[in-house]
């Protein structure tokens, strides 16, 4: 009971102990309490003698300055005044920290036991035998446990000989305890205090605005010395401060985790897409998490909208909980233009070990191609490479040709990003309005570099689909306007080019042409029908064939939906996998070419996939025939958006609640019914359904509309997963049979 009474009067422990031996030993050496031998060896597994422990205890106490450097009187017969520890033994005995034996000996070379060491350090705090109770050593050990003095000590067995490593931990824990009848920790006698639960956020290495001799924390800024451990940045723990200002030690929390580092790739709505550990992922951070941009504190939700590609997000956690987020902005180098002489490698500072993504896929240095645009993030040793190019007619510069920050090429306006692009597009760079140029686009589709006349990235001869042609008005350098002919070409694979030409090529619109480029000007002729191939297209494990002909693994395919010059242009790029098992007749091949190995390397098809068209659901149809006069009024949904169209002198033969195909969502000149499946329909998966046992592929862009009952005028666009053949009556529409390249395009689901 006496023990219980004594413990109840003890102050509650309010400090944090540390399991980090290196930091503990560094601090004890700083305070001149413990140090290594002449060779610097701390000998942490050695036992400790009574003389050694007494010296450490005195050095930890308020009596540390009382030990005389020399004595003329021996404190004990076995510890004469000539003994190295005699001054410390005398101070320890005089101040009741230690005591001798009844035979007037001290036994300085005897090893200290665990319970003896604990008792001595309790006396350093000011406690006496009266505080412990009569039960030895239970009273002493119970009190020490309650004060957290014994935390992280490896061997706490009664009677065991305490080792130097545990002595260091015991002394550190004691320094973090309040002295008896005082409100200050023992370590305050060294003019040292602790700032607890602080996070080291940044130094001048992370933020140049911070002075070189300071560390910024969430508890304020503090001075640092040359021995500061910069690897601790980002960690949370207790800071030991000399005179409340200078960091002399840092003790990270045991649950502090390695930083999670992300490099921002792009914004997807309100989500941040980032690169981490070799893969792209959505950054999952609560908007309320504390965030620091330099020394400015905010929240993740407030700053994430300002993030740009190449920014670094450092996430700091303890025990799985986010302490804070640190942003490093503007770390990306670039843009650099990839060159044949590899000068971009030394300019950016990349090496063979640099992780590279090209067009969103992992790549090597050897896979980079001339005129790619490269950016480098040195902190992550990552490079991002972009391949987007636009070839067209240089029409305008803003605010002017002397200082172009924006340029218009073939009707589209682009921001100028790179210094090389600025120079080449300016009046001093040689590019003139009306020239054919190739824009090399960077990470935000801004102009990173430019290839001008005589140095274009476009092929000198190209065969493709003429999607536009006519005249355009340009402004010359002397501000005079003139009209020039142009033609726009979509090449197999979908790349587009626009050229000035020497005559009106409007008759070539929506046809396949061959363009020859010379000094920036194009000569145009109709392409010869070089089809000559047909059969079933096979795509299996990278092996591709069309009929009996081999197809190159990097084949470029374009599917054309309109071939009449009076129609709106329709075309789309097609991947080989899209054509798997499709039977392509020779009449559907407008143009093909082969490489040196005799493999088909390009195809221009005539409406094989139907993917260039627009699809929707007719919701209202009104056709009027009055004598020789025809007119129509139509309403329809395309991807959940309502549209309307009206006609005169013609009508569209479509029906209400039918799936339809249009050549344009707005102002269509062609609308036709899709084919309805007739039979027992069963949904097999998100990509397939069956009708009377036959399987039909569902387009990835299928539009699914739900009605609560058949006569309802309300339509709701829903995901495919929301409908079942058991709970809905399904009306399913396709454009062509699967073997001809068709897919399910529209589904109307009426609740049963």
Image (tube, rainbow, N blue to C red):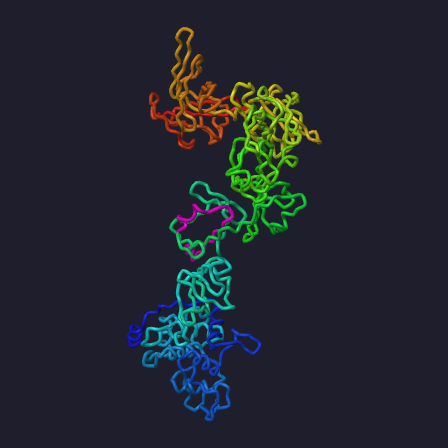
Residue 58's spot in the image, x, y percent?
43, 81
Q: Nearer the viewer, residue 620 or 50?
A: 620
Q: Is residue 142 left or right of residue 467?
A: left
- Residue 311 is inside the magenta segment: yes
Q: Residue at x 67, y 43 (%)?
A: 340
Quadrant of the drawing holding the C terminus? top left
Q: Residue at x 48, y 61 (%)?
A: 203
Q: Nearer the viewer, residue 8 or 633?
A: 633
Please, which residue is most extreme toward the bottom here?
Answer: 72
Q: How many marks on residues?
A: 0
Q: Which residues are magenta?
A: 299-323
Q: Nearer the viewer, residue 451 or 139?
A: 451
Residue 551's spot in the image, x, y percent?
65, 30
Residue 601's spot in the image, x, y percent?
65, 30
Q: Is residue 189 visible?
A: yes
**Please, is residue 298 above or below residue 458 in the view?**
below
Q: Is residue 576 visible?
A: no
Quadrant of the drawing holding the N terminus? bottom left
């Amino acid at each position: 009971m006496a023990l219980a009474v004594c413990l109840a009067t003890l102050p509650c422990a309010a400090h944090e102990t540390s399991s980090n031996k290196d930091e503990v030993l560094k601090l004890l050496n700083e305070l001149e309490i413990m140090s290594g031998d002449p060779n610097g060896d701390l000998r942490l597994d050695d036992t400790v003698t009574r003389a050694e422990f007494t010296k450490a205890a005195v050095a930890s106490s308020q009596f540390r300055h009382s030990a005389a450097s020399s004595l003329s009187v021996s404190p004990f017969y076995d510890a004469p005044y000539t003994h190295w520890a005699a001054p410390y033994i005398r101070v320890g005995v005089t101040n009741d920290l230690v005591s001798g034996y009844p035979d007037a000996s001290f036994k300085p070379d005897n090893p200290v036991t665990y319970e003896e060491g604990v008792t001595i350090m309790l006396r350093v705090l000011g406690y006496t035998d009266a505080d412990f109770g009569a039960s030895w050593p239970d009273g002493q050990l119970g009190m020490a446990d309650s004060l957290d003095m014994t935390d992280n000590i490896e061997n706490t067995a009664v009677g065991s000989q305490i080792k130097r490593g545990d002595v260091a931990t015991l002394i550190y824990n004691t320094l973090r305890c309040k002295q008896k009848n005082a409100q200050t920790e023992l370590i305050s006698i060294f003019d040292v205090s602790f700032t607890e639960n602080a996070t080291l956020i940044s130094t001048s290495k992370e933020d140049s605005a911070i002075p070189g001799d300071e560390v910024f924390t969430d508890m304020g800024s503090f001075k640092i010395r040359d021995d500061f451990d910069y690897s601790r940045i980002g960690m949370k723990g207790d800071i030991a401060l000399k005179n409340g200002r200078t960091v002399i030690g840092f003790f990270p929390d045991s649950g502090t985790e390695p930083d999670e580092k992300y490099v921002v790739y792009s914004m997807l709505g309100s989500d941040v897409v980032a690169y981490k550990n070799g893969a792209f992922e959505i950054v999952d951070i609560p908007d309320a998490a504390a965030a620091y941009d330099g020394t400015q504190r905010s929240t993740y939700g407030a700053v994430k909208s300002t993030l740009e590609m190449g920014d670094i997000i450092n996430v700091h956690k303890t025990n799985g909980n986010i302490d804070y987020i640190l942003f490093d902005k503007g770390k990306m180098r670039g843009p650099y233009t990839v060159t044949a002489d590899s000068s971009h490698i030394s300019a950016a500072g990349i090496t063979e070990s640099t992780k590279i993504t090209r067009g969103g896929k992992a790549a090597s240095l050897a896979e980079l191609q001339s005129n790619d645009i490269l950016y480098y993030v040195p902190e992550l040793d990552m490079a991002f490479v972009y391949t987007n190019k636009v070839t067209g007619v240089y029409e305008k510069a803003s605010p002017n040709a002397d200082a172009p920050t924006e340029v218009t090429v073939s009707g589209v306006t682009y921001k100028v990003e790179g210094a090389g692009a600025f120079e080449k597009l300016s009046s001093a760079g040689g590019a003139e309005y009306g020239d054919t140029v190739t824009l090399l686009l960077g990470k935000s589709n801004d102009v990173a570099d430019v290839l001008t006349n005589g140095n274009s990235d476009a092929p000198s001869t190209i065969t493709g689909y003429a999607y536009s042609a006519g005249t355009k008005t340009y402004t010359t350098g002397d501000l005079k306007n003139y009209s020039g002919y142009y033609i726009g070409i979509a090449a197999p694979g979908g790349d587009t080019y626009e050229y000035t030409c020497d005559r009106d090529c409007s008759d070539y619109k929506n046809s396949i042409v061959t363009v020859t480029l010379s000094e920036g000007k194009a000569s145009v002729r109709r392409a010869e029908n070089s089809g000559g191939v047909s059969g079933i297209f096979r795509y299996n494990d990278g092996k591709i064939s069309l009929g009996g002909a081999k197809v190159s693994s990097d084949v470029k395919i374009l599917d054309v939906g309109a071939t009449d010059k009076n129609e709106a242009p329709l075309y789309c790029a097609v991947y080989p996998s899209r054509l798997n098992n499709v039977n392509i007749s020779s009449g559907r091949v407008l143009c093909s070419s082969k490489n040196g190995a005799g493999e088909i390397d390009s195809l221009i098809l005539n409406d094989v996939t139907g993917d260039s068209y627009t699809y929707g659901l007719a919701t209202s149809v009104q056709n009027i025939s009055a004598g020789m006069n025809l007119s129509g009024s139509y309403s329809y949904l395309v991807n959940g958006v309502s549209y309307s169209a009206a006609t005169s002198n013609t009508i569209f033969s479509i029906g209400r609640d039918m799936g339809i195909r249009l050549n344009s969502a707005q102002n269509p000149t062609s609308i036709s019914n899709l084919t309805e499946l007739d039979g027992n329909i069963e949904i097999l998966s998100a990509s397939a359904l069956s009708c009377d046992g036959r399987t039909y592929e569902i387009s990835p862009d299928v539009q699914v509309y739900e009605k609560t009952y058949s006569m309802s005028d309300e339509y709701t666009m829903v995901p495919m997963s929301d409908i079942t053949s058991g709970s809905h009556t399904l009306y399913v529409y396709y454009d062509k049979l699967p073997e001809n390249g068709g897919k399910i395009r529209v589904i109307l689901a009426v609740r049963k």
